[in-house]
Image (cartoon, coloured by chain):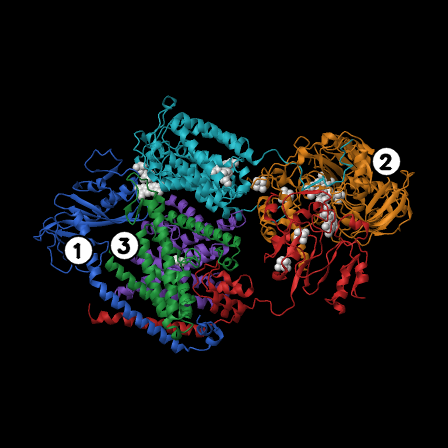
């Protein structure tokens, strides 16, 4: 099934941005020491924000539950540090808006010791049935670490009539600069494999596939080294191509199946998780550590000392950057996430979130764009779009503000905003932004109509 | 047979009613904003042209040999009334057909492509079959011009055409360019 | 502004029930009647002039291609022979016979047409059956490009090539300046196609008509009829 | 006196403000088909003038007797009658020009402008206004016809009304008398018209002559 | 030419007139189709020349669109002004006697009052900026000033002023709610023009955290509530809310007192327009 | 660290939409590729047609540039010529003109190309019709005689032999040029005379200055294909269709109809297929659309050449397919991932 001599398995279209991973791919993961202040936004993902269970003035332990799920699509929140609650109110979020958050002043003598979550008393995971497993995951606060931060337990709660046959672990890490998944696979291959086994058994999947882009040979070899014959796990080298890590592309590359529009992976018997999510599951069920810290890649031309860091959730970005030597003078833009899909940071005082895979800084050189030229209909964007949309047309319609037509004739809602089209455009047209604006408008309109 | 083919090709491409004879410009300039409408209008026009060819032939052979001076007035009255009658029948019998095609009929009857066809066919002494082929070619040519025009206009709708240029002036210029492109068909199938 | 009229004619609901079908029919009939009267009046008024104009036009064309002619009449091919027709109309199946002032037969003026560069080209040429010579060519109708194709009737060099052109075999259009044979015509530069069309029409008409023409000497005699016209000088 | 002024205005408006070609975009077919020379354009203009004025006169005179349902048919009969009159008169008087205008004289019947004036104006106004309006409209139509015909003839033949304007060496712009030239010239003329109107509007805005601002370009879209 | 020719024309024409008159009369009688009477009447009011110059394929389709409100009567180039007035009257587009409602902006934080936390760089448009990390305005509730509403307003009554705030020409606002729909920060609301006491702020914060963001923001000090007639106003979510249903609102001094002590002028007494229009064309073009 | 951005307030942080990375190619660079690819053909033009060709190219390019400059609005004028596309249009129309054309016509052609073909539509990227070809079609329709009077190809020895007709005064006719000759296509169509394939390949035949040399056009075309600057489907489809269609006709009557190789190497087919049909702005976006477009051009060019009144049809074939491009694009939208077609 897997041919190691080929380019690796792949999908059609897509682009080949320079991957820039050399900056950090060999840097071992370091731990960021505690800082004085932490901000834990209550809603860090789509779904319902968590509900605080602490009051201002309460003293909390690292790992202690501070907000509980407030519905099904909602997860728990735990304190990343031992300290005191100083505020529950509006705080600046990365996107510049203000969101309800819990502010914690760290105890200067705080240690890495964490209090084992109360829900994790049952250490024998084999004894859990699926429902108990799902509620345990919800209590653990684990969300998807691949970027979207979608609550993981929701993914596991499959309807009666469906069955998961395959567990797909996403180690593609196709975004340039980011190496956090890579380092994780290199440094903790056993945890990855252990997490795979836990999840596979719980979901009753037959096989596991770990997809890794071929520019991470060390990850592949490390995983293979720890792989034993009894584990039904395949490690699949993938072509280095963006966006190889996007769920649908990954499914196409590995199983050669096209996930129908509007369907979820589970509808075709597949569950997809990022390696980071898998390791978080392993850590939770093996050590009882809820999701209170994550690995963040610090890179980009504007960072003085690129690094891979373990960062407690809620650490202000400014503090993380300071730990890594700060920013270069010419820095103009700071991005949370990867350079292709990440969102720019409006305020450096905003905290690291559960879904933050990287903080990248770019300087004048990268942000000074050439002038925007008119679309010359060169079709490079069509050839880039992995979803076979017509970005050129979408951008034109977006400019003319014909949002309805964008959906009716050109299915703008199917766009995942991967940015491949914009990367490919020689005229420097902000196609994705046009698309996002249109989607925003359309959502707004349909919300108003209902 | 060759003759019929030539009549068809010639009216379709070389001597396109709209682009070379300037017939039917009102709908061509006014209604070519949307592709679907244009296509339907083209179909409906073809239909009326065929009716016209029939009427013209009947009038020419049975009425006008006695009174040639009534040519114009009888063409216009007979064609307009026939089409109006057909329109009302369609409206009664098939509302859906009326919506997609019948609704265009009043517009078509007062346009000069129809009268032009009748007059040209008479001037050239076309018989029944030739007249019908002529009508078919003219209708197809009208539809072709209409559809191309609509495609271009829909496209330019979302482009940055300067506001001052937009409108009929621009449509005329597009038509001129189309007409220029159709010059390439000149002499088609006639060269020795 | 005539407000009274505006309101009366723009209030549809007020008008909808009224005029009964009879009024409708009658008004149509009356309009038809009046219009018929007007049309017949103008027709009668202009009839003679128009007829004269048309006849003159035709005559001039025939005289141009058939020199020395002062009378003409139309011939029609019926029952394997050419007979004289006297109607006004003209169609593809007609040719003209030309006579001098002594009513002596001179030659034929034959018409033909074919698709040209733009549209149908319609020509008339004179033909002497006595020596199988073409005596001249005139274009009756064409939409050839002004400045190019219209040279087939504007360029006198070209037109005069058809004067006394022997028609023993098919004529041929060749590139300007390369004429070597008697039966060749120098085409117009830049309008080779139109030139070739003219030649083609003549060849085709010749094929069609030469077997039909009566034996030399047995041409129909000039019948003095309405169609007859006398060349003014 | 006051009525005289407004009757005069009815006439004047057709020349520029409501010009049937440049503003209302009507009657394009005869407009383009016969304007390959100035003389053709003028004759066509006169023919249209005659038909429009006489039929407006008739329609406004008989408006009370015309039943609503068949009004369009009746207008058409009236118009067609006068067109036949023009057709025969031209054939008798100017056979050479009639040959060039060819089929387009009968097509005056289908000129939407004429029918449009009957319905929009003549059928609702008194005889005097109707005739004034018809005169104005057809004059406006003639202005458009003439400017188009003149431009096309000057560039396409190098002459105006058949009189050579340039030296014998002038290279004629053949396309001007071909169909594309008709479209392009009219398009460019309209463009110029729009540009001019817009300039005027801008100017009026500048001098804050609010009353006249409404007289802006209509969107011909 | 003889006498027969002389009478053929009138005879043929009369009989043709008769024939088609009869056919049409019969057709009207037997082929009549019931439809929305408004359409038929609207069609009657149109010139009926079927010229297509309006862009619709004929008068009937244009009438259908007129009745559905998709087009404006002035789209017909043939009809005279009177015709168009008649049509408008028949279609009843004028709003009627209803109380006049206009669009009001819940924000007064223009360039001079609120700062940018980061610099947005991309194409002009509020929604476009809002999807890029909120557009970088310090106050994440406030107006971005990029003029989406100006573009969206069908009636062209919104114009951005020098301060980067949209000025609604209240006299001509038709309350169509285009601006309400487009604003990414949901700042526009439709309010009766009589509701003159108006709070131009949308920040659900209080005290210094407000003044740190915007000098025109409401810092929830509560002075207006205290000064207004008892019961007219209350604080909801750190913002004062005027209760116009209470019957306590008047246009005299007692109510106007509410705005007097406001430290930031977040509460205003509106006469007609909310902001001054001082659009300096020159300055706006110099941005490009 | 004096200037540590961390210490400042942050308004200097930029918010730009992702992706932050861009590939290297820009639109002006894409245009430059075409300039480079046209170098061999331009050199061949100068070789065969000498000073006349040089002057024609200079005038047509300046006509194009001047028009672009004059009609761009003031705010954008700074950038008006920076993308070099206007100059490219001027070069391309220049290459399609006969060597003896009066220079004033070349200038007019250049400015009509840009004026009617580009500016009026709203500038770069908005036009439906290929500007260069539109300009040429205008010239051909306006001055049909001058545009079909061809000078014979010479060599570098005759570089300074200017066609006297080049220098006609504006609006005036050209003197009859002594060096006139017929193009291979004209010879084929009107005299049924073939031309040696080798001449067609090298380019020493009469014709438009830039279209005669198949070899140098191929060089440029292959360069563009290798650099992936043009869509390979369009030229491929044109060549295949034209070859197949003309081969069928060749089989029916080898005397009357030319061989497929003649069809491909003669006239403007190569120039058109590589440089003009592929103009991204005026050709379809979608891959399927490109095939249809190419097939249409190939079919029409042979149809016009063999059955039409004109000896050459590339110009009109491309313009006609340009007119159909919006329709083609509309009905060949790609199938979206995860959706049925
Ligand atoms: C309302 C909603 C419900 C979802 N339910 C499921 C689910 O039941 N199972 C699942 O595997 N994924 C589910 N997803 C997750 C998506 O399939 C997807 O994995 C998630 O949005 C992150 O995708 P991305 O990181 O590729 O953008 C759901 C997403 C949404 C928005
Ligand atoms: C364009 C695009 C690129 C993505 N790239 C990656 C990636 O490189 N690695 C990854 O783990 N997830 C990536 N994702 C997210 C995955 O689609 C998917 O949501 C994720 O693997 C699900 O796992 P999680 O829920 O555990 O995060 C990408 C999503 C999109 C839309
Ligand atoms: C606008 C235009 C109009 C033309 N009009 C005619 C025409 O009326 N008659 C004709 O024979 N050729 C016409 N041609 C065809 C060309 O001039 C053709 O090349 C010519 O017939 C070939 O003749 P040659 O071999 O003498 O150059 C026209 C071409 C163009 C571009
Ligand atoms: C591959 C390629 C081919 C081009 N071909 C043409 C052409 O044939 N004619 C032209 O006017 N411009 C051409 N251009 C330039 C540019 O696209 C043209 O000016 C636009 O059509 C103007 O909007 C070309 C550009 C590229 C990149
Ligand atoms: S951003 Fe959307 S349109 Fe662009 S390549 Fe990605 S999926 Fe396609
Ligand atoms: S890549 Fe850019 S220039 Fe090319 S078609 Fe797409 S949007 Fe247009
Ligand atoms: S968009 Fe509508 S509601 Fe808003 S200001 Fe304009 S007219 Fe008023
Ligand atoms: S009110 Fe809303 S739409 Fe208008 S400028 Fe402000 S943010 Fe933009
Ligand atoms: S004038 Fe020809 S269709 Fe209106």
User: Chain drawn purple, letter?
Assistant: B
Q: Position of residue C171 (x, y in %)?
A: 22, 40
Question: Comparing marks 2 and 1, which lies closer to the viewer?
Answer: 2
Q: Are marks 1 and 3 in contact (CB under 8 Å)?
A: no
Neighbourhood count class around disc 1 (C-alpha, 10 Å): few under 14, some 14–19, many 20 upward: many
Question: Which chain does the residue under circle 3 lie in?
Answer: D
Viewer-proximal residue, F17 or C115?
Answer: F17
Q: Position of residue C4 (x, y in %)?
A: 45, 74
Residue holding disc 1: C74
Q: Position of residue F277 (x, y in %)?
A: 47, 38
Residue A33 is tagged as 2
Question: Comparing marks 1 and 3, which lies closer to the viewer?
Answer: 3
Viewer-proximal residue, E126 or A195?
Answer: E126
User: Chain drawn red, letter?
Assistant: E
Q: Are the residues flagged by discs 1 and 3 from a single subunit?
A: no
Question: Comparing marks 3 and 2, which lies closer to the viewer?
Answer: 3
- In the rendered structure, the answer to whether residue F217 lies left or right of residue C219 reads right
Q: Colour of chain F?
A: cyan
- In the rendered structure, the answer to whether residue A171 lies left or right of residue F175 reads right
User: Chain drawn blue, letter?
Assistant: C
Q: Position of residue A141 (x, y in %)?
A: 82, 46
Residue holding disc 3: D97
Query: Disc 3 to disc 2, how far (Cα)?
Result: 99 Å
User: Chain drawn green, letter?
Assistant: D
Looking at the rendered structure, the secondary structure element under dot 1 is: strand
Check mark 2 vs ligand 2: CB closer than 8 Å? yes or no: no
Vertical relation: C84 (above or below) B185: below
């Amino acid at each position: 099934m897997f041919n190691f001599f080929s380019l690796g398995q792949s999908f059609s279209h897509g682009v080949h941005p320079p991957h820039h991973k050399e900056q950090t791919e060999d840097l071992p993961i370091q731990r960021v020491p505690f800082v004085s202040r932490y901000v834990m936004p209550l809603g860090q993902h789509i779904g319902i924000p968590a509900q605080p269970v602490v009051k201002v003035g309460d003293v909390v332990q690292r790992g202690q539950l501070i907000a509980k799920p407030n519905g099904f699509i909602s997860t728990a929140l735990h304190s990343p540090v031992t300290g005191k609650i100083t505020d529950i109110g509006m705080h600046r979020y990365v996107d510049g808006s203000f969101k309800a958050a819990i502010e914690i002043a760290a105890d200067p003598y705080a240690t890495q010791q964490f209090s084992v979550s109360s829900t994790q008393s049952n250490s024998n995971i084999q004894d859990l049935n699926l429902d108990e497993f799902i509620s345990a995951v919800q209590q653990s606060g684990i969300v998807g670490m691949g970027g979207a931060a979608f609550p993981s337990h929701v993914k596991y709660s499959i309807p009666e009539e469906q069955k998961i046959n395959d567990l797909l672990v996403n180690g593609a890490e196709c975004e340039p600069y980011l190496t956090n998944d890579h380092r994780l696979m290199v440094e903790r291959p056993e945890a990855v494999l252990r997490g795979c086994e836990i999840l596979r058994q719980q979901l009753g999947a037959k096989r596991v596939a770990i997809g890794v882009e071929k520019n991470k040979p060390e990850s592949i070899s490390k995983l293979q080294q720890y792989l034993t014959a009894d584990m039904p796990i395949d490690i699949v080298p993938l072509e280095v191509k963006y966006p190889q890590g996007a769920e649908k592309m990954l499914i196409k590359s590995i199983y050669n199946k096209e996930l129908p529009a509007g369907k979820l992976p589970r509808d075709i018997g597949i569950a997809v998780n990022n390696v980071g999510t898998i390791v978080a599951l392993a850590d939770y069920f093996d050590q009882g550590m809820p999701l209170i810290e994550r690995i963040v890649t610090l890179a980009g031309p504007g960072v003085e000392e690129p690094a891979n860091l373990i960062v407690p959730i809620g650490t202000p970005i400014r503090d993380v950057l300071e730990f890594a030597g700060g920013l270069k003078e010419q820095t103009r833009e700071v991005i949370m996430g990867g350079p292709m899909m990440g969102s720019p940071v409006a305020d450096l005082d905003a905290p690291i979130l559960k879904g933050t895979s990287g903080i990248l800084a770019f300087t004048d050189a990268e942000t000074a764009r050439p002038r925007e030229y008119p679309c010359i209909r060169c079709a490079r964007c069509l050839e880039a779009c992995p979803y076979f949309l017509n970005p050129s047309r979408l951008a034109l319609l977006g400019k003319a503000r014909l949002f309805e037509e964008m959906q009716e004739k050109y299915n703008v809602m199917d766009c995942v905003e991967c940015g491949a089209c914009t990367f490919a455009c020689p005229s420097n047209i902000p196609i994705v932004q046009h698309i996002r604006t249109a989607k925003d408008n359309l959502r707004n309109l349909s919300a108003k109509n209902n | 047979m060759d003759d019929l083919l030539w009549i068809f090709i010639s009216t379709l491409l070389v001597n396109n009613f709209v682009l070379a004879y300037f017939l039917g410009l009102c709908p061509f300039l006014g209604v070519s904003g949307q592709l679907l409408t244009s296509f339907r209008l083209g179909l409906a026009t073809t239909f009326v042209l065929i009716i016209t060819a029939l009427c013209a032939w009947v009038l020419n052979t049975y009425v006008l040999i006695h009174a040639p001076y009534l040519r114009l007035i009888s063409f216009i009255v007979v064609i307009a009334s026939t089409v109006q009658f057909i329109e009302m029948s369609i409206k009664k019998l098939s509302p859906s057909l009326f919506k997609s095609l019948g609704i265009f009929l009043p517009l078509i009857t007062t346009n000069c492509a129809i009268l032009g066809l009748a007059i040209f066919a008479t001037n050239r002494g076309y018989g029944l079959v030739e007249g019908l082929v002529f009508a078919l070619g003219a209708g197809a040519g009208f539809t072709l011009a209409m559809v191309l025009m609509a495609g271009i206009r829909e496209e330019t709708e979302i482009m940055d055409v300067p506001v001052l240029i937009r409108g009929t002036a621009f449509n005329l210029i597009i038509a001129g360019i189309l007409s220029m492109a159709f010059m390439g068909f000149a002499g088609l199938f006639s060269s020795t | 502004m005539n407000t009274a009229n505006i309101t009366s004619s723009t209030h549809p609901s007020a008008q909808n029930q009224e005029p009964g079908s009879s009024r409708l029919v009658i008004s149509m009939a009356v309009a038809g009647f009046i219009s018929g009267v007007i049309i017949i009046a103008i027709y009668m008024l202009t009839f003679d002039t128009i007829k004269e104009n048309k006849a003159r036009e035709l005559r001039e064309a025939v005289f141009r291609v058939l020199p020395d002619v002062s009378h003409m009449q139309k011939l029609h091919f019926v029952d394997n022979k050419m007979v004289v027709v006297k109607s006004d109309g003209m169609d593809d199946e007609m040719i003209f016979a030309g006579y001098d002032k002594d009513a002596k037969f001179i030659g034929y003026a034959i018409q033909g047409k074919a698709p040209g560069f733009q549209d149908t080209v319609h020509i008339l040429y004179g033909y002497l059956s006595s020596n199988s010579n073409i005596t001249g060519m005139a274009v009756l109708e064409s939409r050839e490009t002004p400045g190019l194709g219209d040279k087939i009737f504007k360029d006198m060099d070209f037109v005069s090539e058809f004067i006394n052109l022997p028609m023993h075999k098919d004529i041929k259009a060749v590139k300007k300046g390369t004429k070597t044979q008697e039966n060749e015509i120098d085409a117009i530069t830049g309008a080779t196609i139109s030139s070739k069309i003219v030649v083609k029409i003549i060849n085709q008409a010749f094929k069609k008509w030469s077997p039909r023409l009566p034996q030399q000497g047995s041409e129909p005699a000039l019948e003095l009829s309405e169609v007859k016209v006398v060349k003014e000088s | 006196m006051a009525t005289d002024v407004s009757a005069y205005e009815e006439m004047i408006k057709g020349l520029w403000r409501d010009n049937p070609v440049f503003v209302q975009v009507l009657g394009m077919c005869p407009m383009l088909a016969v304007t390959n020379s100035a003389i053709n354009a003028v004759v066509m203009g006169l023919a249209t003038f005659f038909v429009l004025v006489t039929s407006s006169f008739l329609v406004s005179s008989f408006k009370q007797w015309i039943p609503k349902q068949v009004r369009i048919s009746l207008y058409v009969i009236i118009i067609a009658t006068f067109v036949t009159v023009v057709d025969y008169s031209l054939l008798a008087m100017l056979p050479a020009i009639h040959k060039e205008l060819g089929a387009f004289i009968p097509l005056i019947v289908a000129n939407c402008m004429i029918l449009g004036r009957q319905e929009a104006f003549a059928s609702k106004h008194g005889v005097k206004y109707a005739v004034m309006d018809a005169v104005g409209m057809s004059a406006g139509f003639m202005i458009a016809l003439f400017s188009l015909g003149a431009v096309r003839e000057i560039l396409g033949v190098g002459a105006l009304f058949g009189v050579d304007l340039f030296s014998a060496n002038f290279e004629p712009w053949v396309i001007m008398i071909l169909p594309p030239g008709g479209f392009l010239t009219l398009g460019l003329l309209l463009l110029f018209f729009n540009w001019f109107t817009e300039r005027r509007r801008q100017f009026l805005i500048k001098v804050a002559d609010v009353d006249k601002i409404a007289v802006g370009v209509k969107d011909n879209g | 030419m003889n006498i027969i020719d002389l009478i053929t024309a009138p005879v043929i024409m009369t009989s043709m007139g008769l024939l088609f008159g009869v056919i049409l009369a019969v057709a009207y009688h037997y082929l009549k189709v019931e439809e929305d009477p408004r359409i038929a009447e609207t069609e009657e009011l149109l010139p009926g020349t079927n010229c297509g110059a309006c862009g619709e394929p004929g008068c009937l389709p244009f009438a259908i669109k007129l009745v559905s409100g998709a087009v404006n009567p002035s789209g017909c180039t043939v009809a005279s002004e009177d015709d168009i007035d008649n049509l408008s009257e028949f279609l009843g587009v004028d709003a009627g006697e209803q109380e006049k409602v206009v669009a009001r902006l819940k924000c007064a934080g223009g360039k001079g009052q609120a700062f940018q936390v980061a610099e947005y760089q991309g194409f002009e448009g509020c929604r476009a900026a809002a999807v890029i990390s909120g557009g970088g305005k310090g106050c994440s509730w406030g107006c971005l000033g990029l003029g989406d509403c100006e573009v969206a307003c069908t009636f062209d009554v919104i114009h951005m002023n020098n301060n980067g705030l949209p000025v609604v020409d209240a006299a001509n606002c038709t309350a169509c709610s285009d601006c309400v729909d487009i604003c990414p920060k949901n700042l526009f609301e439709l309010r009766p023009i009589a509701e003159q006491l108006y709070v131009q702020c949308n920040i659900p914060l209080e005290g210094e955290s407000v003044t740190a963001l915007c000098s025109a923001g409401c810092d929830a000090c509560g002075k207006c509530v205290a000064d207004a007639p008892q019961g007219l106003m209350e604080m909801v979510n750190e913002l004062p809310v005027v209760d116009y249903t209470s019957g306590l609102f008047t246009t005299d001094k007692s109510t106007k007192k509410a705005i007097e002590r406001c430290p930031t002028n977040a509460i205003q007494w509106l006469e007609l327009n909310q902001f001054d229009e001082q659009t300096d064309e020159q300055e706006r073009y110099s941005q490009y | 660290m004096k200037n540590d951005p961390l210490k400042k307030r942050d308004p200097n942080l930029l918010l730009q939409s992702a992706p932050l990375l861009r590939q290297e190619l820009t639109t002006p660079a894409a245009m430059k590729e075409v300039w480079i690819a046209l170098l061999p053909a331009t050199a061949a033009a100068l070789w065969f047609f000498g000073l006349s060709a040089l002057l024609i190219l200079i005038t047509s390019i300046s006509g194009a540039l001047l028009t672009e400059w004059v009609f761009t609005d003031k705010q954008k004028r700074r950038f008006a010529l920076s993308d070099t596309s206007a100059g490219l249009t001027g070069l391309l129309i220049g290459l399609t003109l006969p060597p003896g054309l009066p220079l004033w016509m070349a200038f007019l052609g250049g400015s009509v190309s840009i004026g009617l073909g580009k500016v009026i539509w709203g500038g770069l990227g908005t036009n439906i019709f290929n500007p260069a070809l539109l300009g040429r079609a205008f010239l051909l329709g306006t001055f049909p005689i001058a545009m079909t009077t061809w000078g014979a190809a010479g060599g570098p020895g005759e570089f300074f032999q200017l066609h006297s007709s080049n220098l006609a005064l504006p609006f005036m006719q050209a003197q009859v040029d002594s060096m006139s000759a017929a193009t291979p296509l004209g010879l084929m169509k009107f005299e049924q005379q073939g031309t040696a394939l080798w001449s067609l390949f090298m380019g020493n035949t009469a014709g438009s200055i830039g279209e005669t040399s198949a070899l140098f056009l191929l060089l440029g075309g292959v360069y563009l294909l290798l650099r992936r600057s043009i869509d390979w489907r369009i030229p491929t489809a044109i060549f295949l269709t034209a070859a197949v269609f003309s081969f069928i006709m060749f089989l029916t009557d080898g005397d009357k109809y030319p061989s497929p190789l003649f069809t491909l190497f003669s006239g403007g087919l190569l120039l058109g297929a590589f440089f003009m049909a592929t103009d991204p702005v005026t050709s379809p976006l979608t891959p399927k659309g490109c095939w249809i477009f190419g097939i249409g051009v190939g079919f029409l060019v042979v149809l016009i050449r063999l059955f039409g009144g004109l000896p050459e049809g590339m110009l009109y074939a491309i313009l006609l397919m340009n007119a159909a491009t919006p329709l083609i694009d509309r009905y060949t939208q790609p199938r979206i991932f995860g959706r049925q077609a």
